[in-house]
Image: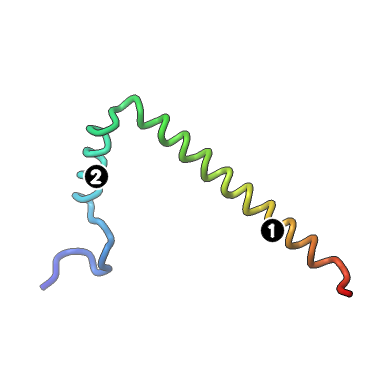
C-alpha cells in the first residue's frame, strides 16, 4: 500500500523541511529576506506588465476595423 501523497510530484512535509534547511545553510539567514524581497518585486513587475498588456489589447478591441 502507498503511504505517500496520492498525487505524484507533490513534496511531503519532510521534503519541504529538508529544502528549507538546505536553503538556510546555503544562503544564510540574512540573505533570505533580500532574496524574497527581490522575488516579490519581480512578481509585482510581472503582474504590472500583464495588466498593461491587457489594457493595450482592450484598447485595440475598441478600434473600428477597416
Q: Position of residue 51 (x, y in %)?
A: 66, 53
Of the numbered discs 1 and 2, the one sitting upstream in the chain is 2
Distance from disc 1 to disc 2, alpha carbons, whole Å, reads 36 Å
Q: Position of residue 15 (x, y in %)?
A: 21, 50
- Classify mark 1: helix, strand or loop: helix
Q: Callout 2: 10 Å neighbours few (<14), some, many (20+)?
A: few
In the picture as drawn, the residue positioned furthest to the front comes out as 66
* 44 in relation to 3, above or below: above
Q: Callout 1: 10 Å neighbours few (<14), some, many (20+)?
A: few
Q: Residue at x 25, y 48 (%)?
A: 16
Q: Position of residue 26 (x, y in %)?
A: 25, 33
- In the image, 61 versus 9, the foreground residue is 61
- Tell me the number on the disc at residue 45: none
- In the image, 65 versus 32, the foreground residue is 65
- In the image, 16 versus 45, the foreground residue is 45
Q: Which residue is mark 1?
A: 54
- The quarter of the rendered structure image containing the N terminus is bottom left
Q: Residue at x 22, y 38 (%)?
A: 21
Q: Is residue 15 left or right of residue 58?
A: left
Q: Are marks 1 and 2 in contact (CB under 8 Å)?
A: no
Q: Which residue is mark 2?
A: 19
In the picture as drawn, the residue positioned furthest to the left comes out as 1
Q: Is residue 56 left or right of residue 28?
A: right
Residue 20: which quarter of the image?
top left
- The quarter of the rendered structure image containing the C terminus is bottom right
Residue 9: which quarter of the image?
bottom left
Q: Residue at x 73, y 62 (%)?
A: 57
- Classify mark 2: helix, strand or loop: helix
Q: Residue at x 27, y 68 (%)?
A: 7
- In the image, 24 versus 57, the foreground residue is 57
Amino acid at each position: 500500500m502507498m503511504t505517500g501523497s496520492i498525487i505524484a510530484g507533490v513534496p511531503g512535509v519532510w521534503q519541504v523541511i529538508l529544502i528549507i534547511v538546505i536553503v538556510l545553510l546555503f544562503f544564510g539567514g540574512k540573505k533570505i529576506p533580500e532574496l524574497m524581497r527581490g522575488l516579490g518585486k519581480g512578481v509585482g513587475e510581472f503582474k504590472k506588465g500583464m495588466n498593461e498588456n491587457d489594457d493595450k489589447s482592450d484598447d485595440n478591441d475598441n478600434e473600428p476595423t477597416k
